[in-house]
Amino acid sequence: MSRPFRFGVTMLTLDSGPAWREKCRRAEALGYDVLLVPDHLGWPSPFPALVAAAEATARPRVGTFVLNAGFWNPSLLAREVATTDALTGGRLELGLGTGYVKAEHDGAGLPFGTPGQRVDHLAHVIEELDRLLGDPGHLPASPQRPRPPLLIGGNGPRLLRLAARHAEITAFTGGRQAPGRPEGTLELLPAEQVAASVAAYEEHAAGRAEPAELNVLVQRVLVTDDRRAAAREFAAHGVGVDADQALEVPTLLIGTPAQMAEQLRERRERYGFSYVTVLDTFMAAFAPVIEELAGS
């Protein structure tokens, strides 16, 4: 039995308090289920932005997508998580990842480390959060017990094992650092590589009592009556996939709203992706797809 779809929107820019609240209310009206904030220097600070999002809306949950674990001390993070969960009425979903931009760590005066060290630190943060927030005596207390739902995002083998052990939601980014491009510039993984990551995760998660929800971040929503022409134009920008691959990769949606809805149904069947996130740049463009999939 397939999970029902959920739809999230990642909010990237903050112009003013009133504009932020209006954007959140607009996302709620368009049918989004989760309002999300990333964790990058130069972008909105996640926790106060999520509190404001929850105060401006009634229905959506709110979440980090995802916190850079290297920025956070576990005890201080536990305080932020519990406070934010309380102030949002138990609507928080906690997304965590390793971080991937060295320049941000340098700018914050924090060590970047090797990939293995970053995964080690993420594991430590998760274990400490479970211990601290699971303690009945922890103050402030988190309304969701023993802690808010945990999302872990990424693709590496160790990270997938970590997600299989700890996360209620596993997010597949479907991207990697583009060779020879500025740090933080991602290219898309072809569909077969995403499928391999999902298969590896499912092997690690085989013993779970409850299956996790699987999330995919859609990088582009290209509304068109000519899918192939749009795929050719997109692939010409050197994004890691050719035109044929662009039509199949699960991190792109190309076509009419009805075609995109069918793509998501097929990808839920193939990969298990029932939780779909888009960037706020495409919030309005994706809204008709949400309507197409209502109740699915």
Image (spheres, helix red, strand yellow):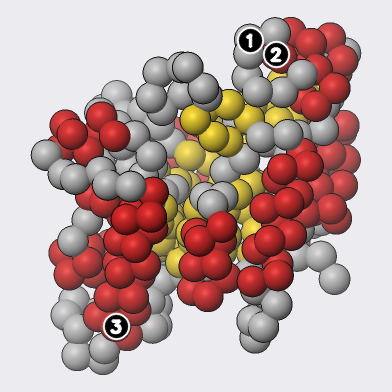
Identify the amino acid type marked 3: Arg
Q: Which numbered marker is on residue 131?
A: 3
Q: Please give the residue where the numbered disc 1 appears in the rendered image.
A: 237
Looking at this rendering, what residue extends furthest in the bottom direction? 136
Residue occupying the point 27% across, 75% down = 128
Closest to the observer: 224 or 227? 227
CB of mark 2 within 8 Å of CB of mark 3? no
- Residue identifier under label 2: 234
Residues packed near mark 1 inside 10 Å, few (<14), some (14 to 19) or many (20 plus): few
Secondary structure under badge 3?
A: helix
User: Which residue is at 84% across, 53% downward?
Assistant: 270
Amino acid type indicated by mark 1 = His
Indicate which disc residue 73 carries. none
Q: Distance between the residues labelled 2 and 1?
A: 6 Å
Image quarter for residue 214?
Answer: bottom right
In depth, the one of 234 and 176 nearer the eye is 176
Whichever of labels 2 and 3 marks the residue nearer the N terminus, that label is 3
Q: At which x and y percent is residue 261?
A: 82, 39
Marks 2/3: CA–CA distance: 46 Å
Foreground: 68 or 34? 68
Q: Quadrant location of residue 204?
A: bottom right
Disc 1, SS: loop
Q: Using the image, determine if residue 272 lies above or below residue 282.
A: below
Q: Is mark 2 on a helix, strand or loop?
A: helix
Q: Are marks 2 and 1 in contact (CB under 8 Å)?
A: yes
Is residue 184 in view?
yes
Marks 3 and 1 close (CB-CB < 8 Å): no
